[in-house]
Image (tube, rainbow, N blue to C red):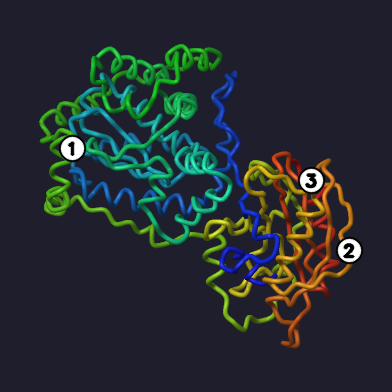
Amino acid sequence: MSQGVIEPRERRIKGALARLVLWLIVLLPATQAYPQSASAEFPNPGNAHMSRDQQQALGMQAAAQVYQQMPVLPDSSPETQYIRQLGKKLVATIPAEHTWPYEFHVVAQKEINAFALPGGQMFVNIGTVTAAANESQLAGVMAHEMSHVYMQHSAKQAYKDEWTQGFAGLAGAVAGAAIGGVGGQLAQMGVKMTEEGLVLKYSRTDEAQADAVGAIILYKAGYNPQALADFFKTLETQGGSTPPQLLSDHPNPGNREQAIEKEIRNWPPENYAGDSPAFQKVRQQAMGVRAYTAEEIAQGAKSGEWAALNRKNGATFSPTAASAGSTGASALASSGTASAPAVSLPNVLPSQRMVMTDLGPVKFERPENWQVMMPKQQGQDVTIAPQAGINSNGVGYGVVLNGIAPPNGERLSIDDATRQLVQYFQQNNGLKVVGDAQPITVGGVQGRSVNLQSTSPFPAANGQPEKERDWLVTVPMRDGGVIFMMFVAPQSEFGRFQPTYEVMLKSMRF
């Protein structure tokens, strides 16, 4: 399938399709708190529809901003060394398949706060260390913040925010992570720099989940999970008219203490760790650290004071992981050449093992060895394909998926929508129609199936151009929009892929 199909917004939409709006069909299912269980088991964090590399890169770049705009203690300081040892103890409880490369830093700020960035960079204010009554409470705050990373709340937030602006905006949420625009991306993820410092925006549902997962981390690390609720409760009683920033950034989900108590009620009893001499020692040392108010930090950030002070003190941050860039469609699309070589069939054949993919409005099974690649720019397609099946000219093996929605609440029949889509592909991508549209049932909904033909982005084994079969399937949605999928492979090899494509269609649920 030519790259023009991958990037439909880059060409002028002609004919009747000009009245339609392309939209991306990605919507994160609403987050929910997790039910209590008889054992402390980590929940599945779900899919944020943003790759780990993208989240880490954004978090790294945000962390670099912190070192420019806030006073950070050097790695050699007793406070940082202690926080990192405590952090390692907590990280060790998280299942390897769901953990992140957590790193811990201490900010010389008086206000009580802590925040963990996407990908695992975590900052603890010195005021939090001195405010905690014991190690369990400090560990509780850290475990709570780590849980936001575990659940990928910031990455998910980007999609929830964009959903309120319409389907098309969702592509932009991924695009920024793939090609730049760090400030805008972090803002979409609820990460922003204010006069009080770098803060993250979480919902009450996020907070309930972070409490639940944080309690599991504490329990498995040998601390009383109730310490987390105790610390928040203490802050609430001290808040007065200006509550601590930690409470402002982390809205109370309601009955926090009772919810944690209910969650841990049936867990096997443990001999929880008592107070720690190491904590009391570092807490005493922390009280003597030169710390700054949020107002002082805001003023110093304007003059560049903290960047200079951090360099002088040896508090430097090297975002090594950020240079790794992103994975997915953007990286793959730029990796090919204009004259791509022929593909070795074993490198693109689908695995017999299918895994479920959840894109919000639609769920379906895909081959385990095929990747889900998000778009580079707003309005582009979701691509499900083997890495070797894509080059700079387009997708040669796999599936592209998108949708159209009529403006102003109009509704199109599935026949009209299919006809206009076909016209669009004919006029803008040079596809030829092979036969008439036929009825097809997908997920209990009657859609349309049309066979088209084009030139594959990959040559045949002899180096000559190869004909490609493009199987278009359209399915109407309740809101009047239409989801469409284009299954592609060279004409000579399509029969090897068609059974997998049919399994994908059969598994689809809307």
* Residue nearest the observer in this picture, 130 or 331: 331
Mark toward the start of the polypeptide (3 vs 2): 2
Task: Tell me where residue 110 sits by quadrant.
Answer: top left
Image location of residue 244, percent across then percent down: 26, 24
Given the image, on which type of amino acid does mark 3 rest? Ser
Residues under labels 1 and 2: Cα distance? 69 Å
The disc at residue 507 is 3
The disc at residue 436 is 2
Given the image, on which type of amino acid does mark 1 rest? Ala
State which quarter of the image contains the N terminus: bottom right
* Residue nearest the observer in this picture, 259 or 20: 20
Mark toward the start of the polypeptide (1 vs 3): 1
Image location of residue 370, percent across then percent down: 67, 58
Mark toward the start of the polypeptide (1 vs 2): 1
Task: Tell me where residue 485 sits by quadrant.
Answer: bottom right
Image location of residue 387, percent across then percent down: 63, 65
Residue mark closest to the camera, 1 vs 3: 3
Task: Tell me where residue 467 sits by quadrant.
Answer: bottom right
Residue found 26% across the figure and 36% down from its top: 82
The disc at residue 343 is none
Query: How crowded is the residue under tag 3: few (<14 C-alpha within 10 Å), some, or many (20+)?
Result: some
* Residue nearest the observer in this picture, 493 or 421: 421
Residues under labels 1 and 3: Cα distance? 53 Å
Residue found 74% across the figure and 70% down from its top: 426
Image location of residue 425, percent across then percent down: 72, 67
Residue mark closest to the camera, 3 vs 2: 2
State which quarter of the image contains the C terminus: top right
Q: Which residue is identified by label 1?
A: 108
Given the image, on which type of amino acid does mark 2 rest? Asp
Element at label 2: loop
Query: How crowded is the residue under tag 1: few (<14 C-alpha within 10 Å), some, or many (20+)?
Result: many
Q: Is residue 291 above or below residue 231?
A: below
